[in-house]
Image (cartoon, coloured by chain):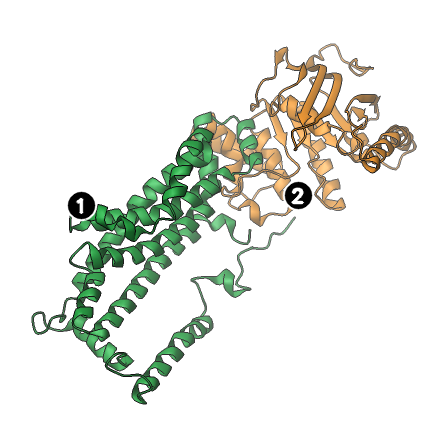
Amino acid sequence: MVTVTPVATTKSSDNVGVFASAHLVGRRIAGPLIVLVLWQVASTLQWVDPRFVPSPVTVASSWKEWMFGPVGTGPYSGTWFMHAANSSYRVLVGFLLASASGVLIGCLIGWFRLVSDLVDPVIQILRPIPITAWVPFAVIFFGIRDGSAFFLIALGAFFPIVVNTAAGVAGTPKLLVRAARMLGIRPHMLLPRVVLPAAMPFIFTGLRLGIGLAWVLVIVAEMMAVKSGLGFAMWDAYYFLRLDIIIAAMLSVGALGFLSDLALRLMGRWTLRWSRGL
Amino acid sequence: MNQLAADASPTRQRRIAVRGLRKRFSDIAGQGQIIALDGIDLEIADDEFLTVLGPSGCGKTTLLNVVAGFETASGGEVRVDGEVVLKPGPDRGVVFQEYALFPWLTVEQNIEFGLRERRVPRAKRKARVRQQIASVGLSGFGQRYPQELSGGMRQRVALARVLVNDPKILLMDEPFAALDAQTRSIMQQELLRVWSADRRTAIFITHNIEEAILLGDRVVVMTARPGRIKDIVAVGLPRPRDVTSAEFNQIRRHVAVLLEAEVQATFAAMETGQPP
């Protein structure tokens, strides 16, 4: 009898991904920790002016107050969760809009020559335009409200998703399409049963790029077109030169962005479990 | 030369008829034309195992692709049970050299693919898949992904995936070319065992002389490009065949001489850079 060895082994660190061993987790935490220590040393020894670059300890205590302080005792006290929830909600809605439209349109572009010829040039011309350039239109059409943020985030995240999906769909191995036709597939089932699964690795790449952009754009939107959220708090803190709050908000975005990407990676690992070691 | 083999029983019927088949491709630059097949005439009986042997680039894969319905004829026609072949279908199961399994489906789901697409009820589907898995020696591997299997195992899945549809015709394009010698030998035996059970029409493409004679009722030897039929050799040895026997090697010598001239012609064409 032929024996089969499992393919997904933990032999190299880039194969391990999110399921890292304790040893690897330690190694990955060491880098940020060293940066923190250097930063604290630089502040304590006054290499940098603490009025402009607050020390990690200052940031931590301000952040703590921002999160857990009693509401009303200070301009930022106890408001972190509200801001974080607002930003997360906008990212989620914008990203879902971008995913749905990006995957759908990407499939059509990748599969139908006519759609590609008609739509792809439009996308390629719009794509290099910075999303910030759309802010005036967003505000005019959607007002200083969530709608503006949804629009800006969805638009920005749409492009990497649509481009990657189209590439993945267009790259479906012809041999697999032949095999499916030989097995008697009905033509309209080719897209869901063969093309979409074959494009899945590309689609997930697009989604991960999209979620990263969504966090960039939620801050842009909240600085310019909405009056709540971490981006708004950052802009507001800038007027009062509360650089400790700005740094806390920056780290908050970093952490939330990391967590949402982690969630996507876990979904990707499960969906693409067949491709391990491919 | 193109009649059915001499030992035809009265119940034998013609399954595949290839008449005057021509196939041209434009080359990649789009300037010249490559003639892959230049007038192929061939008749294959419903219980026949036909092997096709030829130098690389002689158009043997093209012939298979036209019979499968993947490519259309530039001239002439292919008929299966009297019907002109226009598109692929589950009545002609194809086993590819590169396996062409769906990597995101398990072994079981790969084998089930055709039945599911043709809306065979679930219970019936499961029963047939289970039976097919057992008959090609894949029991216990149903939940594996193709990525986790060796080349030989993958080709078993590919074979099971078409056999489960109960095709009239089995088309195989160098299915064992990527396997090591031992695995290839095992797979040849397995294929003959499975084929002998119902003796469905089979076309098997190979560039390996021994394999062609070991498997086929008749061996079609093709010329260098443009592909024509040089000769058809009826093997006429009882199975299982002994590759070391004198009779076997007499045929091997005969086929080798036929093929040698064509391999030389292919090399000569490559060296002068002239399309033949």
Residue A55, x across and y down, in percent? 28, 81
**Left or right of A220 on screen, residue B220:** right
Residue B222, x across and y down, in percent? 80, 25
Name which residue lies at 18% across and 45% down: A140
**Image chain in green:** A
Numbered disc 2: what chain? B
Residue A87 location, quadrant: bottom left
Q: Point out the frontmost of discs 1 and 2.
A: 1
Q: Which residue is mark 1?
A: A140
Name which residue lies at 89% across and 34% down: B245
**Which amino acid lies under the numbered mark 1 shown in the image of this protein?**
Ile
Residue A59 location, quadrant: bottom left
Mark 2 lies on a secondary structure that is helix
**In this picture, is B150 found above or below B99?**
below
Name which residue lies at 48% across and 62% down: A16
Chain B hue?
A: orange
Name the foreground residue: B59 vs B99: B59
The disc label shown at residue B152, or none: 2
**In this picture, is A55 found above or below B190?**
below
Name the foreground residue: B11 vs A263: A263
Residue B72, x across and y down, in percent? 62, 20
User: CA separation, marks 1 and 2?
Assistant: 64 Å
Look at the numbered discs 1 and 2 and tell me whether their residues touch, using CB distance below 8 Å.
no
Q: Judge whether residue B199 can be spotted in this image.
A: no
**In this picture, is B160 found above or below A30?**
above
